[in-house]
């Protein structure tokens, strides 16, 4: 059986410099993968390229999801198919409440889905009724232990680092993607915020969603338990294993893999 989400020999450049140099990775529903590596190895480049950021130029390779090479689709079409990216540095939007942003996002994603077409271009479903939306939002905020007043605040404006990351996980909860990419969600979080965000990820993960956790440190993996761990150096995955690989990296660092990549 073909994997749910398959990255094949992906090569991506930024400002004319090749960053991803033939990266391949398969993710299935119900699996949690951790992608670890030193700073500058290309982890965030992978995240942005998967979501279709225009700064990241795809030089070659394919990314297959639901029978489509998503590299041929726009970012909104990828989102409608069920791909989600939680940003390392979420953007603030003044004048737009979190609740209004989420309702617009939910309706946009629902509007691209239809039973007859899985590529994000179908006629789609009707907007979620406001009462149903409020009920869903209330349930997800309770799951993430977020105060209801949070929904009335402008998106990420004045948010702490932990609040921004919880807002990202709330978006994931509302959009219910099939493949979720978390780009250094642990960045800038204290231990309490990290634990709460991780509990939210764990509550949402399950048989209907595959998760790719991109991280530099092992600490988030104390809470979000990966099925597979991959080491990324110089734009390529150079080692893969189980959860024990993350503990090895915590103890030994990346030097061995960096030297191996440099000598190959």
Image (cartoon, rainbow, N blue to C red):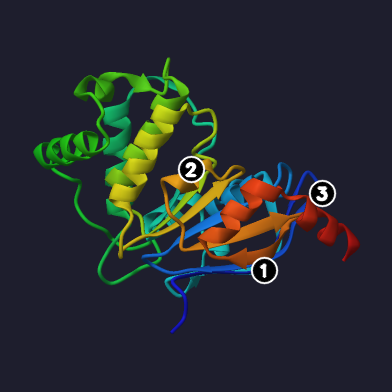
In this image, 59 relative to 70: left or right?
right
- Residue assigned mark 3: 17
- Residue assigned mark 1: 61
Work out whether 201 lies above or below 12.
above
Toward the right, the furthest residue is: 263
Per the image, label 3 sits on a secondary structure element best described as strand
Work out whether 155 lies above or below 59.
above
Per the image, label 2 sits on a secondary structure element best described as helix
What residue is shown at x 48% (from left), y 71% (from top)? 68
Q: CA distance from mark 3 to mark 1?
A: 16 Å
Specify which label sits upstream in the sequence, 1 or 2. Answer: 1
Per the image, label 1 sits on a secondary structure element best described as strand
Residue 164 visible in the displayed image: no
Specify which label sits upstream in the sequence, 2 or 3. Answer: 3
- Tag shown at residue 220: 2
Q: Where is residue 72 shown, x and y percent of the image? A: 56, 63
What residue is shown at x 33% (from left), y 55% (from top)? 205
Q: Residues within 10 Å of mark 2 (few under 14, many from 20)?
A: many
Specify which label sits upstream in the sequence, 3 or 1. Answer: 3
Q: Where is residue 149 shown, x and y percent of the image? A: 22, 19
């Amino acid at each position: 059986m073909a994997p749910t989400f398959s990255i094949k020999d992906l090569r991506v450049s930024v400002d004319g410099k090749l960053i991803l140099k033939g990266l391949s990775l398969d993710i299935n529903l119900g699996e949690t993968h951790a992608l670890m590596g030193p700073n500058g190895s290309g982890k965030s480049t992978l995240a942005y390229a998967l979501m279709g950021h225009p700064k990241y130029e795809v030089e070659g390779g394919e990314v297959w999801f639901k029978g489509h090479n998503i590299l041929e689709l726009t970012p909104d079409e990828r989102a409608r198919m069920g791909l989600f990216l939680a940003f390392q540095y979420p953007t603030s939007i003044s004048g737009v409440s979190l609740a209004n942003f989420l309702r617009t996002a939910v309706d946009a994603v629902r509007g691209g889905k239809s039973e007859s077409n899985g590529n994000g271009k179908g006629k789609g479903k009707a907007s979620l009724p406001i009462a149903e939306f409020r009920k869903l939002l209330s349930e997800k905020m309770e799951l993430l232990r977020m105060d209801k007043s949070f929904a009335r605040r402008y998106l990420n404006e004045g948010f702490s680092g932990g609040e921004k990351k919880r807002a990202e996980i709330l978006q994931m909860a509302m959009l219910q993607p099939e493949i979720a990419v978390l780009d250094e969600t642990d960045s800038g979080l204290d231990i309490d915020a990290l634990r709460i965000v991780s509990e939210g990820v764990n509550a949402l993960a399950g048989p209907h969603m595959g998760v790719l956790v991109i991280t530099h440190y092992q600490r988030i993996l104390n809470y979000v338990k990966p099925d597979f761990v991959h080491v990324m150096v110089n734009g390529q995955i150079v080692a893969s294993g189980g959860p024990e690989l993350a503990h090895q990296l915590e103890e030994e660092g990346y030097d061995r893999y960096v030297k191996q990549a440099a000598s190959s």
